[in-house]
Image: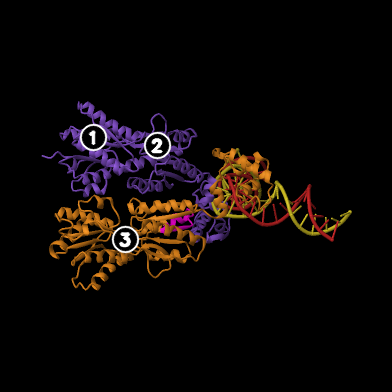
Chain colours: A purple, B orange, C red, D yellow
Amino acid sequence: MSREGKVSLKDVAKAVGVSPALVSMVLNGKAKQYRIGDEIAKKVRKIAKEMNYAPNLLAKNLRSGKTQLIGLIVTDISNPFYANIARIVEDRANELNYTVLISSTDENFENTERLIEVMQNKGVEGLIVVPCDGSRELIKGLYESNFPVVLLDRYFPGIDVSSSCLDNFRATTLATTHLIEQGHRKISLIAYDTEMYHILDRIAGYEDTMKKAGFEVYIDVQKVNILNSKPGILDALQNMVHEKHIDAVIFLTNMLAINGLYSLNEMGVKIPNDLAVIGFNRNVAFDLHYSKITFIKQPIEKIAEQAINTLVSRIKNRNHLLKSFLEPELIVQESSLRAS
Amino acid sequence: MSREGKVSLKDVAKAVGVSPALVSMVLNGKAKQYRIGDEIAKKVRKIAKEMNYAPNLLAKNLRSGKTQLIGLIVTDISNPFYANIARIVEDRANELNYTVLISSTDENFENTERLIEVMQNKGVEGLIVVPCDGSRELIKGLYESNFPVVLLDRYFPGIDVSSSCLDNFRATTLATTHLIEQGHRKISLIAYDTEMYHILDRIAGYEDTMKKAGFEVYIDVQKVNILNSKPGILDALQNMVHEKHIDAVIFLTNMLAINGLYSLNEMGVKIPNDLAVIGFNRNVAFDLHYSKITFIKQPIEKIAEQAINTLVSRIKNRNHLLKSFLEPELIVQESSLRAS
DNA sequence: TCAAATTGCTTAATCGTTTTAGCATATGTG
DNA sequence: CACATATGCTAAAACGATTAAGCAATTTGA
């Protein structure tokens, strides 16, 4: 028995009275292949179990060059959306015999850069990344160095990196169409200032639908900063409600919706009578709101599973590429229904 | 250059024209200690950087017997409370040069058992565990085998395992006292059925405070199941409100509070006029509720940091033991204030 | 009956590090 | 000048596993 009380292959070999090589072969199920005798194989298995042998994964991985490790880089694991994703990735990865390393970037480019390097040093075989603003070239670099990456939740058009995202254009198309059907005309959007395409697509879906419906009414897309959003959102909503006299609003992210609802409460705006509201992503607060909030639901399970599956395929086959845009669903509740 | 395009120590050594041993010594900052010449050391560092050398952590760890890996086993990483914990543990662990493996047990004993084994096989040097019902002996076994463990959020009295928890008794003492001060007399508690001490302590804090205040009124502690809690909670609340005519309720967990508020909405109970309410742990829904919910706030950062710090101390010093019960805070909002 | 094939195992190299022991050469001491 | 010490490096073993190559002993085939 070597250090730490851990039983090694050698210990088992000594106990059985054979070479370590034989033990390795047997325990890896290659007894037939290496023509090991049946009785001795049985004996090895028995004694290994008795001694409570567990292979040292470090040694195993060092030898094989595989770490069975993948990295999940999100913006913030304490954000329920990403926590949900993490849980599913974790479960699926375990089934596939991979271990997941998780880290948060706080939407910061330097952090992203550093974390990718750290993870690569730790030997991850691939990465699932929620890229932040300005990380296009970084991701492109990974792709060009042939390192397996799958983007999650967000993507970059024009570079051949796999991605597992929502069909964001469709999401706001659904929401806008629903509001129009409910008889709303002056519909506004609260977005935030970014160059990321998941948000741009959401904006486009809204604009496109409004234009096609023939509503000349130009609805200003207020840009608010994602970090100190509360005052910004209050301003935006006051402008929308009191100056522009809008009758519906779509919030482009969950955080915007939460802060927006908070502001609307402060303003004394009654939902849905004064204003119809649609949020993004499920949130317990939506169901507990005095007017249950209609929201755009992402297929979280599918997005997460798609990401991990695609990554593993990519690790095993360097040519595998899959960009998927999954179908959103509009969960209609009270907040978006026309007062009768 | 060996496989995978990765630069190894040997590659650097060859490039510089020295032995791998020397390169290792220099790059580990042991040049002085091993009497390496200044010029050659400088040259090694320069070339290593140029070649973009990064040590293979697998080999390093195999050699040292250290993995710099710790495990975090929670009941569900998609639960915001644990997601928050995970984030802090992650950050602190990185500072201490550890990597964190996260898994979820779903409050299931077999899962816990399996995950602990899996993590040990992966070579974690220690574990932070949120133990579930029935895992006392399992944890005791770990402790007896001298494996570093720190319990988080929950603990077992009578076994000398480090733990980082809330002072749960004090938590409900605070809440109950506050309600009494507000003039409430018929105060009830919604708990769930478990033998875990964090919940028993919460119940005890409430009972103790009520008795000391001299309120003979016996308030039934409804036990509801944690899994399919919605119907159970509705029943419990209907009984409390309509039969027992209570005027205040304390929910012992966040989930109970959320489902409870949901039920109270359905019942048409007005907060705080018909019923005062106190929840557990912050939740966005509390601030968005028509009556902002008073809640017991856990010092999440402290709990998480205490846990990881204690674990690392324990890894480095087999005798280190610390059981801490951290101070809760009552965030008083509208839901618990006496209607005037 | 004797070479060839098969069976059942061991030896040794390897993965990328770290570290102890040791070997020259140079320097210091009396 | 001889011997001890200091200096600057290398060789080799080790961590724990995998696997190609090889070696006896036995069985098969013509």
Res. B329 mark = 3
Q: Does the image show residue A241?
A: yes
Q: Chain of mark 1?
A: A
> How much space separates mark 1 and mark 3, taking CA atoms?
40 Å
Question: Which quadrant of the figure contains the N terminus of chain A?
Answer: bottom right
Res. A133 mark = 2
Q: Chain of mark 2?
A: A
Q: Give the x, y percent position of residue A228.
A: 33, 43
Q: Does the image show residue A36?
A: no
Residue drawn at point x = 53 percent, y = 61 percent? A5
Is B32 or A74 nearer to us in this picture?
B32
Residue drawn at point x = 33 percent, y = 39 percent? A225
Q: Chain of mark 3?
A: B
* Residue A313 position (above or below residue B27): above
Q: Which residue is denoted by mark 1 in the rendering?
A: A188
* Residue B67 position (above or below residue A208): below
Badge 3: few (under 14), some or many (20 or more) residues near its Cα, within 10 Å? some
For the residue marked with disc 3, what is the amino acid?
A: Glu
For the residue marked with disc 1, what is the amino acid?
A: Ser
Under circle 3, the secondary element is strand
Q: Give the x, y percent position of residue B123.
A: 49, 54
> How much space separates mark 2 and mark 1, taking CA atoms?
24 Å
Is A175 or A302 nearer to us in this picture?
A175
* Residue C5 position (above or below residue C20): above
The magenta-colored residue range is: B116-128
Under circle 1, the secondary element is strand
Q: Give the x, y percent position of residue B262.
A: 20, 53
Chain-order first, disc 2 or disc 1: 2
**Side of B226 relative to A147 (left or right):** left
